[in-house]
């Protein structure tokens, strides 16, 4: 257990120190797919060194998208939250992206980067939420997590040793506290201030309908 904790700590420190340009959404294109408003996103900087090093150390990373439909009075009328879980199989050396109940697998980094650069059919809201006479635009927030939020507590518990039988001794207890502080410093909300936001052009429901036919 001790060795696992040290390996995880090393992976966390390495990912935290990696220098990355910020990941961002460079364009947002609203579309219609059946009864849903969806959007096509072009991005830059994904997965980036922080996520890549974390994934290749056996951890799960995440890319989170907050999508909001805003009317011309700047009121939010609908929206969605999408979380993409990024992983790397250390045995098969295959990358994976999980989201919306589906999993996509990639045999090399170039294919993963290509997929993340062009995210299509990102679900936004039912078309019925849009007034045919109004105009709207999409606000997109993108946030990256070297360790996925769902994984952070598990990783911290392994490092701190809360779920293992703790040995006696002040040296080990001190080491556990130090590792716990490091994991909290690096990954417990440390990237929240780095969220990138992007906005689409104005559109109407009729324009989406026309384009879909």
Image: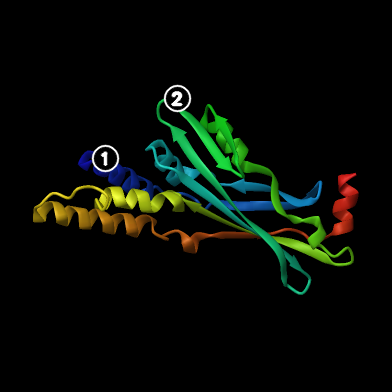
- What residue do we see at 26% from left, 44% from top? 5
- Counting from the top left corner in percent of width and height, residue 8 is at 31, 43
- Counting from the top left corner in percent of width and height, residue 203 is at 82, 59
Determine which of the numbered discs, if any, sits on residue 92 in the image.
Answer: 2
Residue 153 is left or right of residue 99, and the answer is left
Q: Residue furthest top?
A: 92
Disc 1 or 2, which lies upstream in sequence?
1
Could you say which is closer to the camera, residue 108 or residue 169? 169
Is mark 1 in CB contact (under 8 Å) with mark 2? no
Q: Quadrant of residue 124?
A: bottom right
User: Callout 2 environment at 10 Å: few (<14), some (14 to 19), or many (20+)?
Assistant: few
Could you say which is closer to the camera, residue 119 or residue 164? 164
Could you say which is closer to the camera, residue 29 or residue 151? 151
Could you say which is closer to the camera, residue 84 or residue 140? 84
- Counting from the top left corner in percent of width and height, residue 57 is at 37, 38
What secondary structure is marked by label 1?
helix
What secondary structure is marked by label 2?
loop
Q: What is the total number of numbered labels drawn onto the structure image? A: 2
Q: Quadrant of residue 199?
A: bottom right
Residue 21, compared with residue 204, is above or below; it is above
- Counting from the top left corner in percent of width and height, residue 176 is at 20, 53
User: Visible in this render: residue 50?
Assistant: yes
Q: Which residue is mark 1?
A: 4
- What residue do we see at 66% from left, 42% from top? 118
User: Callout 1 environment at 10 Å: few (<14), some (14 to 19), or many (20+)?
Assistant: few
Determine which of the numbered discs, if any, sits on residue 99 in the image.
Answer: none
Residue 32 is left or right of residue 42, and the answer is right
Residue 17 is left or right of residue 127, and the answer is left
Q: Rounded to the nearest whole Å, what is the CA distance between mark 1 and mark 2?
A: 21 Å
- What residue do we see at 47% from left, 62% from top? 192
Q: Dividing the image into 4 quarters, which one contains the C terminus?
A: top right
């Amino acid at each position: 257990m001790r060795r696992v904790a040290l390996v995880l700590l090393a992976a966390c420190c390495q990912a935290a120190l990696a220098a990355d340009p910020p990941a961002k959404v460079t364009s947002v294109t609203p579309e219609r797919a059946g009864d849903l408003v969806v959007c096509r996103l072009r991005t830059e900087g994904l997965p980036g060194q922080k996520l890549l090093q974390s994934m290749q150390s056996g951890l799960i990373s995440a890319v989170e998208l907050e999508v909001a439909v805003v009317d011309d009075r700047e009121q939010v009328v609908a929206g969605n939250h999408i979380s993409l879980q990024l992983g790397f199989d250390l045995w098969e050396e295959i990358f994976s992206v999980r989201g919306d109940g589906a999993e996509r697998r990639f045999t090399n980094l170039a294919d993963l980067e290509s997929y993340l650069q062009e995210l299509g059919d990102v679900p936004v809201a039912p078309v019925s939420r849009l007034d045919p006479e109004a105009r709207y635009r999409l606000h997109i927030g993108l946030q990256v997590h070297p360790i996925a939020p769902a994984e952070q507590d598990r990783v911290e518990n392994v490092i701190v040793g809360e779920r293992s039988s703790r040995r006696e001794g002040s040296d080990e207890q001190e080491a556990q506290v130090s590792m716990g502080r490091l994991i909290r410093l690096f990954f417990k909300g440390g990237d929240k201030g780095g969220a990138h936001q992007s906005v689409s052009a104005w559109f109407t429901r009729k324009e989406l309908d026309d384009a879909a036919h």
